[in-house]
Image (spheres, rainbow, N blue to C red):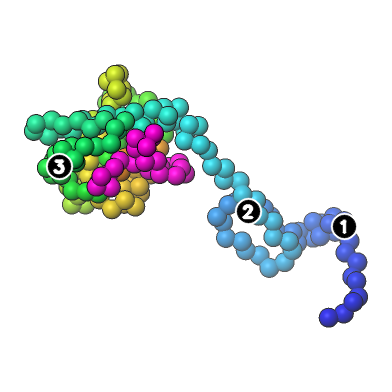
Amino acid sequence: MTDDVKKIRPDLVRIHGRNEVKERTSFMCVITGYRGAKLVTAVAMTSTPEQQDPDWPRYPDTILRFATVPPMEIDLRDIPSAKAVSQLRATGVSDPFAVITAFDPRGRNLSLFENEKRQRDLEQRLKAAGYKFVPVDACSPDQSHCERSVAVTIPQQDAIDIARDLDQIALFWFDGSRFWIVGAIVEADPLMLPRSS
């Protein structure tokens, strides 16, 4: 190693003029080119769940109404009781399972007609793939807002992939004893429910 110091010109005009500087690339793009500087900028900004859907803070207050005989209800503001977990297992889905909806992609309110068509398409997709599911309504505590959903026995990553395909902010996940909110199109740490636990 020599002690020679090589002077570097701060003026890059000559290089730019010869098009030797690599153009900026977006996040997750492959960098190509053989000459010049490789400038990479991460332009893919992540947004918070609240920015994607203003209703995000209310997700943990959801009540799940399973269309079973007899009907059953799980309030996600409470830890499911042993009786409730036993009833869940009797619904026809086994744990772990996901609760997925096709309603209101990206938190945008669609018409009932559009939402129902999306939900039928989801159910057909699950049937075609051989997944077992039970219809569920995911409702606000005052029942002013409900989204038709399905409880489906499915690997978690497959559930997330389907939710992403449907432009869903998140899904509910039951691990056998507790429910979680798991991000789909938003990057968020899984949130164990109830949120105060």
Q: Secondary structure at mark 1?
A: loop
Q: Is residue 175 magenta?
A: yes
2 or 3: tag closer to the N-terminus: 2
Q: Which residue is mark 3?
A: 86
Residue 77: image location, x then y, percent: 31, 30
Name the disc covering residue 10, or none.
1
Label 2: few (<14), some or many (≥20) within 10 Å? some
Residue 78: image location, x then y, percent: 29, 32
The Cα atoms of the two marked residues, 3 and 1, are separated by: 71 Å
Camera-side mark, 3 or 1: 3
Circle count? 3
The answer to whether mark 2 and mark 3 are in CB contact below 8 A is no
Residue 6: image location, x then y, percent: 89, 70
**Chief secondary structure of the magenta portion:** loop
List the single residue furthest toward the bottom.
1
The range drawn in magenta is 174-197
| In the foreground, 37 or 170 | 170
Q: Secondary structure at mark 2?
A: loop
Q: Which residue is mark 2?
A: 25
Q: Quadrant of the N terminus?
A: bottom right
Q: Is residue 170 left or right of residue 120?
A: right
Q: Quadrant of residue 192?
A: top left
Residue 8: image location, x then y, percent: 88, 64
Mark 1: amino acid: Pro
Mark 3: amino acid: Ser
Question: In the rendered image, is residue 197 in sight?
Answer: yes
List the single residue furthest toward the left.
69
Q: Is residue 25 left or right of residue 178?
A: right
| Residue sitting at x 27%, y 40% | 99
